[in-house]
Structure formats: structure tokens, C-alpha cells
Amino acid sequence: HAAVPHTRSGPPITSTQISSEARASIAACRQRAAQLEKENEKVRHTTAAALASLQPGIKIPMMSTVDGYMVVALDNAVPRQLVAEALEALQQRAAFQRVEASSPKHMDIRHMVTEHDADTFVATQLYERIATLVSILFPDKGFHADRIYTNAMQFGDA
């Protein structure tokens, strides 16, 4: 076996170098994290139950904050029929005509894009459902469609 070089300077830290106070603090943090996870599970379940009148079977697999912004992932929030109707409404789309960057931070990641008519999408029941969910979950935020587009799936796409 080849020796693995150390990536930091100094000798490796051993578990015997961690004080009993630090160990107790780490144990308390682990315990609190487990409590928070259970509380989060209850909140997700309660929220999903409240949304069930809008869509039976809705699930919230993840609800958390990232840099102070609430992020909510929903499963079974939209009936397949609404998605199919929206796709049909948007079928009159142009071919993938333009290549654009994934984001200003990732100008090297590029993909084909086709634009859709925002007014056409806003008139669908799918948009209405999404807008309703956003207004319920984020009542202090506005929601409107600035741009509707589709990225082409390409090998190596991010």
C-alpha cells in the first residue's frame, strides 16, 4: 500500500485529545439535532395534512432553510392530468434555438433552450395550482411568471 500524504500540517489529532467538556458538547449537539429532526418531521406531516384538501396524498419530504430562505419540496402536489394539459398547451413551441449559460457563476455550463409563451402557461390549471401552493406556503411572497422555458437534456448537462 502506498502511503497517503497528510493534507494538513502537524501530527494527526487523536480522540484522546478532545476534552470531556468537548465530548459532552458534541453529544448534546447530536441529541438536539435528533430532536429538531423529529420536530421537522411533525411540521412536515402537519403541513401535508393541511394541504390534503387541495391534493390528496401530498407529501413534504423536505422542508428546511438554506441561508435564511425557506425551501419546501412537495411530492404528489400536482395531478398528472394538470401536467399533461400544460404540456399540450405548450406543444406549439419553437425548436431549441438558443444556447445559454446555466448561470452567471457557471458560464462554462451551457445548454439549449426554447422559450414558451408565458401568457399561455399562466392560463393553465398547472400554473394556477403552483401559484396556489406558493401563496399558501409563502404568504408573504409574491409569485408571477417572468419567463417560461425548457432546457434541452444533453449528455453531461448539469
Image (cartoon, rainbow, N blue to C red):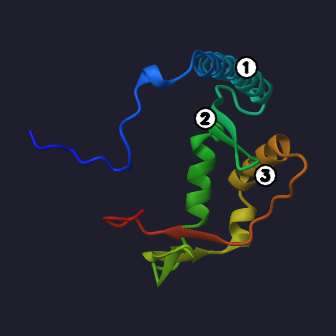
Q: Residues within 10 Å of mark 3 (few under 14, many from 20)?
A: some
Q: Amino acid at mark 2?
A: Asn
Rendered view: 76 above or below 49:
below
Q: Residue at x 43, y 22 (%)?
A: 15
Q: Which mark is residue 60?
A: none
Q: Amino acid at mark 1?
A: Glu
Left or right? Give the position of 57 relative to 16.
Answer: right
Q: Quadrant of the C terminus?
A: bottom left
SS state under label 2: loop
Q: Earlier in the sequence, mark 3 or mark 1?
A: 1
* Residue 129 at x, y percent in the picture: 74, 47
SS state under label 1: helix
Q: Residue at x 86, y 54 (%)?
A: 141
Q: Amino acid at mark 3?
A: Ala
* Residue 65 at x, y percent in the picture: 71, 42
Tell me the residue that label 3 is attached to: 131
Instruction: State the image quarter where residue 144 is shown.
Output: bottom right
Tell me the residue that label 2 is attached to: 76
Rendered view: 52 above or below 27:
below
Instruction: State the image quarter where residue 30 is shown.
Output: top right
Q: CA distance from mark 3 to mark 1?
A: 27 Å
Left or right? Give the position of 122 relative to 101.
Answer: right
Q: CA distance from mark 2 to mark 1?
A: 22 Å
Tell me the residue that label 1 is attached to: 39
Q: Residue at x 35, y 67 (%)?
A: 154
Q: Residues within 10 Å of mark 1 (few under 14, many from 20)?
A: few
Left or right? Give the position of 73 relative to 131.
Answer: left
Q: CA distance from mark 3 to mark 2?
A: 16 Å
Observer-nearest of 68 and 120: 68
